[in-house]
Image: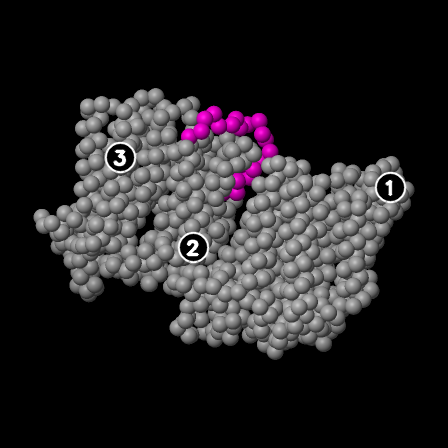
Amino acid sequence: MSATDLKALLPLLIVTITAVLAMLMVAIRRQHRATVALTFGGLAIAFASLWVAAGSAPHVVPPLLTIDRYALFYMGLIFAASMVFVLLSYDYFSKLEGDHDELYIVMLVATLGSSVLVASTHLVSLFLGLELLSVPLYVMVSYPRTRALPVEAGLKYLVLAAVSAAFLLFGIALIYAAVGSMELSRLATALSIREQLDLRLILPGMVLLVTGLGFKLALVPFHLWTPDVYEGAPAPVTAYIATVSKGATLGVLLRFFHATQVLSIPSILLVFWLIAMASMLAGNLLALLQPNIKRMLAYSSIAHLGYALVAFQAGGDLGPSAVTFYLAAYFVTILGAFGVISVLSNSEGERAAIEDYRGLFWHRPAIAAIFTAMLFSLAGIPLTAGFIGKFYVVAAGASSAIWSLLIVLVVTSAIGLFYYLRVVVAMYGRAEERYEPEPRLRPIPNLLLAGLTVFLLWLGLLPGTFLRLIRDAVGGLS
Amino acid sequence: MMLVWWIAILLVAGVLSAIAARWNATAARTIALAAVLIDFVLALGFWMRNPVAGPGSWIEQADWAWLPQFGIRFHLAVDGLSLLLLLLTFFLGAISVLASWTEITEGIGFFHLNLLWTLAGITGVFLAVDLFLFYFAWELMLVPMYFLIAIWGHENRVYASMKFFIFTQLGGLLMLVAILALFFVHHRATGIYTFEYNELLGTVFPPGIETWLMLGFFVAFAVKMPVVPLHTWLPDAHTEAPTAGSVLLAGLLLKTGAYGMLRFVLPLFPTAAHAFAPIAMVLGVIGILYGALLAFGQTDLKRLVAYTSVSHLGFVLLGIFAGTALALQGAVVTMICHGISTGALFLLVGALQERIHSRELAQMGGLWAAAPRLSGAALFFVLASIGLPGLGDFVGEFLVLLGVWPVSRGLAAIAAIGVLIATLYGVRLVQRALHGPNVHNWRFPDLVPREGLAIALMVATLLWLGLYPQPVIRTFQPAMQYLEQMK
């Protein structure tokens, strides 16, 4: 392994070292605050090292990984989201009994897995990254193990994720059987010569691959775990699943499909068309009457991934950058939304029912305003990042003239407005007695939420700089 | 720069007002009123100072790059039409601050923030000439308006506000798709990525596309106007909104729809709009009759006034798509006068509700004895609304009818029946509410000076528009001439 290899892999190495250090530290002395500081510091250094790695990008670390600007950009998103997760968890778990240090260690492993995923240009590293991500998630979901809901959610996630991993493996095997290689570049070359292709193996292989990844993305019809896991997992973990896990999976999906251009095979395009349609419709319709905000956000996340798939299918110049921007905007928004839920939770439990939010604005206007901004961003209202994201997706769709998907997107987003507004209405409602004021001031989560909101508005008003960054990153994708 | 100031003053004053309300409610109200009045005076001065620009050109512009990757610019521009609508915006804005002076007692700061930001959004809609910026402002004015209804509205406010938001959002998203499609069609034809209004004019469309894009815009504006059958949000929203909200909705938000037709649908898609005109005109006539008939059947006073809006805006739609010089003039005059007369009616109904806590006609009767000033004012605006000669609304509707006549005699004749039904609902309102014995023994204070001032200003404006509309017509005339040339 050369020095350049090490330089390119620096972010991954730093995350790994942090995990090991944290483990050693916990073995010597348990202290929540110290573990959090170490984890956060490690992630921050890893984030900073992205610029070091960018110096040698694009760099192929044969045979498994490629560290290009695309991978580094996604790693940036993943590290940033993980840092937010650390701060939220610190606030959230301080309110609970028990030891919380191991949570950060497994989270670091999951973050490592996600980073491997977005840098993978080989089916083996894809599977490796996905498992590195999945296994820690089982632990994270059921971390408050004295409570019933998290344990149930964790078990559900374990069973379904294991099954979907099996599907993925089988898909990889079929593709390998057809093409004779698992390297992305070989796959791309083999798939570009359509005449020699054995579609009898490739098609089922691709469909199984999509099944495996679609499970992680919670696309219809692989979405059944989503509401239960979202509801059962602690709010920061839910935020982590919604952002890091889905973001990394979408990142690798985009890379593989962009490189192999399999979407130009009509039957695969049809599969994606159906999945996008079904996700947009089912997600929005099922969210409509949810009285629980976490479940509602679970269904809404299904719909949002459906929107992202619209841009994904658009392809062309705009498609990949639209997907990436949409994802980044979604990261900020959903971290903010679950951040609010997490901050409002206390030792007795989480405030997840919409009714718990009635009259919030009149007692804690700042946090209600932040939540409103996040919900409006999810609904795609101007001033917020979500608006630019939706605009970008529609632009990508319009440039490729996929009207059927766009019409469904428009209609379902209008339907979706209903359930976001339900929460907003509740927060600004007049039933004052339901909400007791904040007992003590906690600067870390409050500053964090304020920062996320500022970032949300910045992306919504002046996304120019960020767009350039994304175009740079996606430009390296080939 | 003036154009940016108009928006900035409203936005900043909104925040200031919200902060001031922590200490003093009157200070918050005064800040809001002052901001709107400053804007009004600035706009009035601007109108006096500037000669009217020729057809198809702007009086003043402000233009900065915003998102160069997409060719999006922060581009504002004003011509005679938008200037007049801005004057109306600031005028009614001041009226609505006055109208909520005693009505709103909870969350005063946040109320004025929303009120001023709604006005800022509307100002943005009337000024934006970058299609992206236009859509941005279009969506943005919804949110504070939604809060106005959802928080300070009446009994059924949650349902009404949500319906309002979802209807307009659906229309808006269709427009977004149409805007982007136009953007790419234009790019394919010229190789330039731009949302610039002036550049998108005269885009050459591949066959079959133009009608669809025109419909995308049309539906968004038709929801706002509203055009039957997309009007169902309107009676609910108007009825449940607080007085200021109803004034803004009827006086201004509906006008943004009509403005969109004039500014975007006709010039951007001349061929498709021309082909679609007969259908739009029929829809307009249906709106006139339907609105008037339903107004006749209402027992809730606010709902009644709301349905008259459907009817009047039917005239506007009819005039816009008839496309003759007179019809277009009539449509714009109706837009302005309807804003004032209906705004005044909502103000009066609101004042009445504050006093007797009811909007039901059955609860009224003989109010003239209890409150002669209020009743007299109501009579005046009812007469204006049903088109009494000498008042502004008459000028507008008469011009529309005159202008439609050469295009379609049948439609003009049917539309005239609408004026007849208007008399029925007007007379019914006056008889049931104001005349007769005071069976419920109402005793309440008459209009206070603050309300009286607002009403007097509106009376004067309507009289002026009815007797000497020439300065106004001269101001928007070039914009209408430009539309005629497009045909």
Of discs 3 and 1, which sits in the foreground?
Answer: 3
Q: Give left or right: position of A340 versus B485.
A: left
**Number of the label disc, if any, that sits on residue B231:** none
Q: Residue at x 31, y 46 (%)?
A: A77
**Number of the label disc, if any, that sits on residue A39:** 3
Which residue lies under the disc numbered 2? A462
Within 10 Å of disc 3 (Cα), the crowding (few <14, some 14-19, many 20+) is: many
Q: Nearer the viewer, residue B27 or B57?
A: B27
Q: Chain of mark 3?
A: A
Q: Residue at x 69, y 51 (%)?
A: B94
Question: Measured along the vertical axis of the image, is residue A415 above or below residue A58?
Answer: above
Count of marks placed on residues: 3
Q: Nearer the viewer, residue A1 or A182?
A: A1
Within 10 Å of disc 2 (Cα), the crowding (few <14, some 14-19, many 20+) is: some
**Residue A114 is drawn in which quadrant?**
top left
Is residue A207 something that shows in the picture? no
Residue B233 magenta:
no
Q: Position of residue B167 (x, y in %)?
A: 57, 52
Q: Give left or right: position of A248 versus B97.
A: left
Q: Which residues are magenta?
A: A420-442
Q: Are marks 3 and 1 in contact (CB under 8 Å)?
A: no
Q: Position of residue B220 (x, y in %)?
A: 56, 59
Q: Position of residue A222 (x, y in %)?
A: 33, 43
- As shown in the figure, which amino acid type bears the numbered disc 1? Ala
